């Protein structure tokens, strides 16, 4: 968790600094009344807290810093493995997949996007029964499309 | 109260409500049985769908999912020693040995009946305590609410994970995300980049489904790729099947059931203490109190009863702070707050005054849901086990498709789908790095309430924030906040 804390602290710190010194000042307006809090107050407080905690995380991740003895996370258990190369590669794969799915949703619609995604995801997770794969990949998006139409009269993209 | 509850039953006892409760229970059990999903995922996906239901049907449906999901998690725990939900991990300790000894149905019956007992007990406590709590909370003003919310943030951050720093950082990020959109007082835009889709703020559905459901599914998909998917097999037994659970066997455990239900209710009433904690506390207390503690872990019915009664008792008790204060006890209650808001109902002390009929109808639905849960769970006891065998590499990709539909349907917006994908990625990184997603979601939900309380305090007291320390209630909660920061932030490091 040492390296993870260092990386997470750095990302959180940079994000908070960008929000504090660019985003919030440029995209909020001053208070309308002298008695009221400025609209920027709450987001600023939240980001100052994040910046402060990012500093603590970085400190705990430094080789000479005091760090938490965390072996297993209570909320996620063994899932909290830290930010290794594999995690970052998986994250990158998800970003690329999201972009492709969004483009397919906008251009070719839900059924094509759904079928393509299901085929890719099931092959990725090594499903080797190709008849079952084809049945689910085609059947689910089509079924969902019509269920949503008949139940809510909403047309999926 | 009795008249109000009878009125609630009259309003709630309709075919539509019963139908949605049944659907919710079945869905909850199925999601609970499917490894890695659970009731929170199911609620997150289904909250948007409830937009098309009446408020009573919507909340009853979601409560049904929660009840079904909590007991459903016990089924794979008993059959294949793979808890469907984290809180069912303690059930596996005695449930699976009993299944291996040729009594899988006996173990599942004990789990179901104990779960329903815990549910009924906590629902009764909810009905008895919600109104008095709300009456006390009505005396609170904005400074008291600001202090209570601040205390809740600290408590949830301290208890949700092992790192207080990461918990508070996640809650602060949630608060920041909640401020995007139009300012609640001035209606000026905040960090919207002039995008109309952001004027109403970030969609709760996109955030909740993305961080809670999608990120969990993504994590499991990547793990399935790396480790492979192994088909689950039910236990093979060399013994004859003995699956009868006599009333005598069940009621012998009445002390354990009652003790565990009290523990679960107590844990549920406090924000941040999760269902898993209740399950392990209940199990531990039963073992300490047992005359034969050495039998625990070898298939003791007492162990199953203790775990299931306590984890199910959290469900109803969680709604006490939710309804009385508007502060969710855990993430499932936080999602219920979102569902209330979709229907124009703001949880908090005024809810018992302004929407008393709705509240008592929900209470009535919860009591009816317990009976339906018992019936459906008992009838389907052999069917639920079949879901355990569905391979993850079929279920997980399909759930992502459900997530897309769940976000798109209420908003008709691909922008929200894109946001959900982004939050899915963020949630995945948070899971891996140990940042609490529960804190993020609760920070997002309580952020606007905290900001409004602070701004009302400023306006009412002419910018003098000393009221936060001169009001006794507010001062007590501020002291508690400082104590918890000290206790979990500094003392735990020693």
Image (spheres, helix red, strand yellow):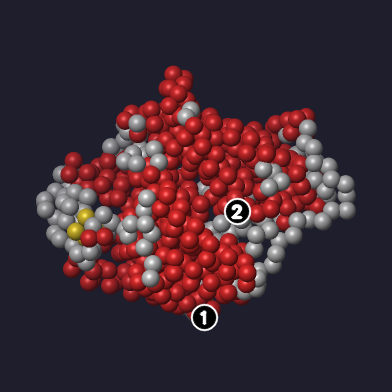
Seen at 70% across and 64% down, the residue is B231
Q: Residue furthest left?
A: A33
Residue ID for mark 1: A85
Residue ID for mark 2: B85
Asked whether residue A3 appears in the rendered view, the answer is: no
* Label 2: chain letter: B
Q: Nearer the viewer, mark 2 or mark 1?
A: 2
x, y percentage for residue B106?
76, 42
Figure quadrant of residue A6? bottom left
Q: Secondary structure at mark 2?
A: loop
Task: Depth check: give the residue in front, B402 or B217.
Answer: B402
Q: Quadrant of the N terminus of chain B?
A: top left
> Is the Cβ of the residue at disc 2 closer than 8 Å to that at disc 1?
no
Whether residue B427 is situated above or below residue A11 in the rendered picture: above
Q: CA distance from mark 2 to mark 1?
A: 28 Å
x, y percentage for residue B468?
28, 44
Are labels 2 and 1 assigned to the same chain?
no
Task: Depth check: give the residue in front, A15 or B315.
Answer: B315
x, y percentage for residue A38?
18, 56
């Amino acid at each position: 968790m040492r390296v993870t804390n260092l990386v997470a602290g750095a990302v959180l710190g940079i994000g908070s600094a960008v929000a504090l010194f660019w985003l919030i000042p440029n995209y909020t307006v001053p208070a309308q009344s002298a008695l009221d809090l400025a609209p920027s107050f709450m987001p600023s407080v939240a980001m100052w807290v994040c910046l402060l905690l990012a500093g603590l995380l970085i400190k705990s991740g430094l080789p000479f810093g005091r760090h938490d003895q965390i072996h297993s996370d209570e909320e996620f258990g063994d899932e909290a493995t830290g930010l290794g190369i594999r995690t970052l590669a998986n994250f990158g794969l998800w970003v690329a997949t999201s972009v492709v799915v969004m483009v397919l949703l906008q251009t070719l619609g839900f059924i094509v996007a759904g079928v393509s995604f299901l085929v890719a995801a099931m092959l990725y997770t090594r499903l080797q029964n190709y008849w079952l794969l084809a049945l689910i990949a085609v059947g689910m998006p089509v079924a969902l499309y019509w269920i949503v139409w008949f139940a809510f009269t909403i047309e999926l993209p | 109260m009795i008249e109000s509850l009878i009125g609630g039953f009259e309003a709630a006892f309709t075919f539509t409500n019963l139908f949605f409760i049944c659907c919710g229970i079945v869905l909850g059990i199925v999601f609970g049985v499917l490894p890695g999903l659970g009731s929170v995922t199911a609620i997150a996906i289904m909250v948007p769908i409830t937009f098309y239901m009446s408020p009573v049907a919507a909340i009853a449906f979601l409560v049904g999912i929660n009840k079904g999901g909590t007991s459903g998690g016990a089924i794979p725990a008993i059959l294949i020693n793979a808890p469907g939900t984290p809180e069912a991990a303690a059930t596996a300790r005695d449930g699976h040995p009993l299944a291996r000894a040729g009594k899988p149905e006996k173990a599942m019956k004990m789990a179901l009946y104990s779960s329903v007992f815990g549910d009924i007990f906590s629902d009764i406590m909810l009905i008895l305590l919600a109104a008095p709590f709300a009456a006390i909370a009505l005396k609170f003003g904005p400074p008291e609410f600001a202090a209570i919310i601040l205390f809740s943030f600290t408590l949830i951050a301290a208890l949700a994970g092992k790192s207080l720093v990461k918990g508070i950082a996640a809650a602060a990020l949630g608060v920041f995300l909640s401020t995007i959109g139009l300012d609640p007082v001035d209606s000026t835009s905040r960090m919207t980049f002039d995008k109309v889709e952001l004027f109403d703020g970030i969609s709760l559905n996109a955030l909740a489904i993305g961080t809670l459901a999608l990120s969990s599914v993504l994590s499991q998909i990547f793990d399935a790729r790396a480790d492979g998917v192994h088909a689950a097999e039910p236990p093979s037994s060399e013994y004859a099947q003995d699956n009868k659970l006599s009333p005598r066997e069940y009621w012998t455990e009445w002390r354990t059931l009652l003790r565990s239900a009290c523990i679960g209710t107590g844990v549920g009433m406090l924000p941040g203490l999760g269902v898993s904690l209740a399950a392990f506390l209940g199990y531990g207390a039963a073992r300490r109190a047992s005359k034969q503690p050495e039998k625990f872990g070898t298939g003791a019915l007492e162990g199953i009863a203790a775990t299931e009664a306590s984890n199910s008792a959290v469900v109803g008790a969680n709604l006490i702070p939710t309804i009385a204060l508007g502060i969710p006890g855990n993430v499932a209650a936080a999602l219920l707050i979102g569902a209330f808001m979709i229907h124009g109902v703001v949880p908090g002390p005024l809810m018992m005054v302004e929407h008393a009929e709705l509240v008592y109808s929900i209470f009535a639905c919860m009591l009816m849901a317990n009976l339906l849960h018992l019936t459906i769970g008992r009838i389907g006891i052999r069917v639920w086990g079949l879901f355990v065998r569905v391979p993850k590499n079929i279920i997980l990709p399909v759930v992502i498709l459900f997530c897309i539909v769940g976000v798109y349907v209420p908003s008709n917006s691909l922008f929200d789908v894109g946001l959900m994908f982004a939050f899915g990625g963020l949630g995945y990184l948070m899971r891996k790095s140990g940042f609490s997603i529960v804190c993020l979601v609760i920070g997002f939900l309580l952020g606007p309430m905290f900001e409004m309380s602070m701004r009302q305090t400023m306006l009412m007291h002419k910018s003098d924030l000393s009221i936060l320390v001169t009001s006794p209630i507010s001062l007590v909660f501020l002291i508690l906040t400082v104590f918890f920061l000290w206790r979990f932030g500094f003392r735990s490091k020693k």
